């Protein structure tokens, strides 16, 4: 195998592929990228056995071939090279020679036969979606996914394909984000699936405004973006019925500047207990007060802000980190917050929804500590 490629193009592809390479594995071959050259088309593949990414790159090919090269070592070298042409060719034994300008490197490789085959997926149904739209959904959902491996269904994003819309949900049991996309309706035959958040984060880094094609199979989902293909195994299990936890009668409604409220939360949280992260929100007519204290170290913080509020006087407590993250992802200049009682979940909404879209965020309170 022998080819030449611009350093900038090569580096971009390697960085994209490296995101799939597992940080820990009992299969050393998974730390490699599979290279396959045919003519002037270089195909590259990485996998962690759950998620696979296959991309292609136009190069100047001189000799076809196939082999697996350690991803981190190759990426680290290419990252330090000057912009210009990079030449890669097979050398003696299992070595690969890499040249750029006056620099020369030799890297070990493995036979292509040792690299796992990509899953053979029989796609049942396909649908299309705008790439930027899906990326926006992922950016506002992924942070709310659980990292608890004991509850695997919560480590992914729930996709429900309905007659009138596509509903996406992410929750870790403390906070929840639900997006209803009315532009992607009419696919109810696809039912519902749970997609690992790692696959969606990889997708969000790769997509642009181009159309993404979903390919649905029995236990896999396939995303096609031009010549790039991302395969992901679906998470098996039943996603919790989240509609029942969304309060329908939170009648105490606050509207205020999102950035201002977020700044108050961040300021006051520096005085909160480092374990509970609890901050208190006190609401009275047209005023929001945010406070926190840590009696163990004697710290106390308090900040007030004028808001639009005419509901009952309420004091409610939240985890400051969770509340600040939700505020960060609201996406509009003003935020709407709906409260019921101090022990009931609060709703956090954008001032205005994007076109053909409805976004809802929910945060469970914590017990008020005096």
Image (tube, grey):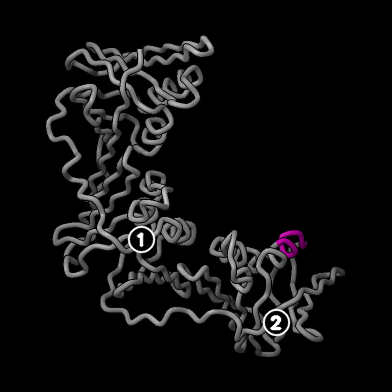
Residue at position x 31%, y 60% in the image? 194
Q: Residues within 10 Å of mark 2 (few under 14, many from 20)?
A: many
Q: Are marks 2 and 1 in contact (CB under 8 Å)?
A: no
Residue 357: percent from left, percent from top = 24, 48
**Quadrant of the rendering where the C terminus is positioned:** top left
Magenta-drawn stretch contains 349 = no
Q: In the image, is 195 to the left or to the right of 110?
A: left
Span highlighted in magenta in the image: 76-81
The residue that disc 1 covers is 195
Looking at the rendered image, the disc whose residue lies closer to the viewer, 2 or 1, is 1
The answer to which of 26 and 274 lies nearer the viewer is 26
- Residue 3 is tagged as 2
Image height of 4 relative to 277, above or below = below
Check the image and name the residue furthest to the right: 102
The answer to which of 128 and 92 lies nearer the viewer is 92
**Quadrant of the rendering where the N terminus is positioned:** bottom right
Q: How many marks?
A: 2
Residue at position x 18%, y 45% in the image? 243
Residue at position x 65%, y 82% in the image? 67
The answer to which of 290 and 110 lies nearer the viewer is 110
Classify residue 58 by image quadrant: bottom right
Image height of 352 relative to 252, above or below = below
Residue 349: percent from left, percent from top = 26, 35
Classify residue 323 by image quadrant: top left
Residue at position x 52%, y 68% in the image? 48
Residue 327: percent from left, percent from top = 37, 33
Specify which label sits upstream in the sequence, 2 or 1: 2
Check the image and name the residue furthest to the front: 150
Magenta stretch: helix, strand or loop mostly? helix
């Amino acid at each position: 195998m022998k080819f030449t490629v611009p350093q900038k193009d090569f580096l971009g592809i390697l960085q994209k592929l490296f995101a799939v390479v597992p940080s820990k594995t009992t299969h050393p071959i998974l730390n490699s990228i599979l290279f396959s050259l045919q003519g002037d088309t270089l195909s590259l593949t990485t996998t962690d056995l759950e998620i696979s990414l296959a991309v292609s790159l136009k190069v100047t090919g001189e000799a076809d071939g196939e082999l697996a090269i350690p991803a981190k070592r190759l990426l680290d070298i290419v990252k330090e090279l000057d912009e210009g042409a990079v030449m890669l060719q097979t050398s003696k034994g299992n070595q690969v020679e890499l040249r750029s300008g006056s620099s020369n490197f030799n890297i070990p490789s493995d036979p292509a036969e040792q690299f796992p085959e990509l899953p053979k997926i029989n796609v049942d149904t396909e649908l299309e979606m705008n790439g930027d739209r899906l990326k926006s959904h992922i950016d506002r959902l992924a942070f709310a996914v659980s990292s608890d491996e004991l509850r695997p269904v919560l480590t992914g994003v729930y996709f429900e394909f309905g007659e009138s819309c596509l509903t996406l949900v992410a929750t870790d049991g403390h906070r929840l984000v639900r997006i209803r996309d009315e532009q992607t309706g009419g696919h109810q035959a696809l039912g519902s699936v749970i997609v690992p958040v790692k696959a969606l984060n990889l997708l969000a880094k790769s997509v642009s405004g181009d159309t993404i094609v979903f390919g649905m199979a029995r236990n896999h989902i396939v995303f096609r973006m031009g010549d790039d293909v991302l395969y992901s195994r679906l998470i098996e299990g039943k996603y919790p019925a989240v509609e029942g936890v969304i309060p329908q009668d939170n009648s105490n409604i606050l509207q205020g500047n999102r950035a201002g409220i977020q700044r108050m939360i961040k300021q006051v949280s520096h005085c909160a207990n480092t374990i509970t992260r609890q901050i208190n929100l006190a609401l009275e007519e047209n005023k929001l007060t945010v406070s926190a204290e840590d009696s163990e170290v004697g710290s106390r913080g308090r900040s007030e802000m004028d808001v639009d509020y005419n509901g009952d006087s309420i004091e409610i407590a939240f985890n400051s980190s969770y509340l600040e993250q939700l505020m960060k992802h609201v996406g509009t200049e003003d935020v709407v917050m709906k409260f019921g009682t101090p022990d009931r979940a609060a709703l956090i909404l954008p001032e205005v929804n994007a076109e053909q879209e409805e976004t809802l965020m929910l945060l469970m309170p914590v017990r008020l500590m005096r």
